[in-house]
Image: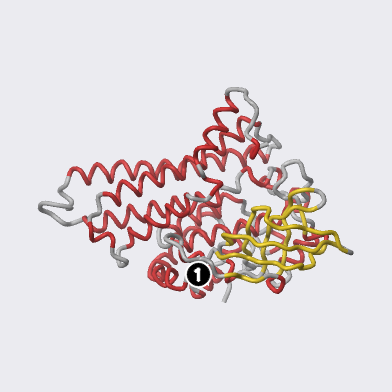
Amino acid sequence: MAIEEKALGRDEALRRAADLLPRIRERAPEAERLRQVPQATIDDLRAAGLIRVANPARYGGYGNDMDLYFEVAMALGRACGSTAWCYSVWSSHNWLIGHFPEEAQDDYFAAGPDVLSSSSFATMGRLEPAAGGYRLSGRWGFSSGCDAATWAMLGAVGPEGPCMALLPRSDYEIVDTWFVSGLRGTGSKDIEVRGAFVPAHRVAAVLNPAAYSPGFELHGRPSYRLPAMTLLPFTLCSPLVGMAEGALEAFIGRIKGKSGPGRTADSVALQLRIAESSAEVDAARTIVRTTVTEVLERAARGDLPSAVEQAAVRRNYGYVAKLCLQAVNRLFDASGGHALYDSEAIQRFHRDVHAGAHQVALYWDPIAEAYGRAVLGLPPLEQYR
């Protein structure tokens, strides 16, 4: 039975997430086999009240902001990267819907506060005007968590430019293309739409920083004062922090208490790797927390980031992904042949953190270039204008 309550603070949310970790860890191989998050895990997340952490309060949320679901995603990543990834994505949509027109929000949450939706932000769809709205056609890839979702948010181009369209499950087909090396349990399959009708109120330019959003007027949360993409990519790097921590825990668990030659606790080389990787994980977590906290605190005062500050936020979430990759690679490189077995958690974390870091929003080179250009006073790259 789902928990019904008016408030859920950070400590209690993280305690509930921690309580779920043994079960989620045990189901991680099942998530890979199914190529989607097991229903039992989804049921656990709902029963713990964690799905609605990001919801606006009027739709069953607890009054929290984005920082809390990033924290929960980092915690869950220690047990199963795919579960953490999908949790973070589902939560981000329950926040992002707050930028849509109010009627669309009412539609989305009509069945209750624990709704799940998938997405694909690439503008692969075409919207054609129709009476009362549009007709949408297209095919999108990488729609994480789509099997459990009852809605999809899909990028498209319409008469007024790039936008996102919101569709119920009955209006699209899931095409099973998800045969991959990492994050197998995310079920990030293709979505196909053939001429579905989308009412006008379910189309919004939510990713355009200049577009109107009713979010702050309706919900009063600092994050709704910000352009959606200011903090949204932390949705993707937060699970990576948890995965890197999970890899560190698995590595320590394999050698702790073992003595003698080889890969044992007596090895100075392994001790040094543990120290450096743990520092990187701690640094990554600190970057997430401090960046998100600072941006939200400033937004609460109505102080929005400048172009250089936006570039610094992007630099930070890109660097979080870079730190997590380095930490896991260092540990996996010293794990020996037995780490290759499916029964070893570290090989799954290694595959998963690489898969997550391949997300285009976390790709370091353009992020770093954009930051350098910003601080040097050069025009921004096209994708960041």
Tell me the quadrant of the picture where the N terminus can be found. Answer: bottom right
Q: Residue furthest right?
A: 131
Q: Residue at x 60, y 28 (%)?
A: 374
Percent coordinates x, y for residue 287 in the rendering: 48, 40
As drawn, 292 above or below 61? above
As drawn, 378 above or below 86? above
Percent coordinates x, y for residue 266 in the rendering: 15, 48
Determine if residue 16 is in view: no
- The residue lying toward the viewer, choosing from 179 and 79, is 179
Q: Residue at x 42, y 61 (%)?
A: 181
- The residue lying toward the viewer, choosing from 131 and 6, is 131
Q: Residue furthest bottom?
A: 1
Q: Residue at x 56, y 34 (%)?
A: 312
**Which amino acid, by three-letter code, is at mark 1?**
Gln
Label 1 secondary element: loop
Determine if residue 229 is in view: yes
As drawn, 52 above or below 299? below
- Residue that label 1 marks: 36
As drawn, 308 above or below 21? above
Residue 366, quarter of picture = top right
Percent coordinates x, y for residue 286 in the rendering: 46, 42
Q: Residue furthest top?
A: 376
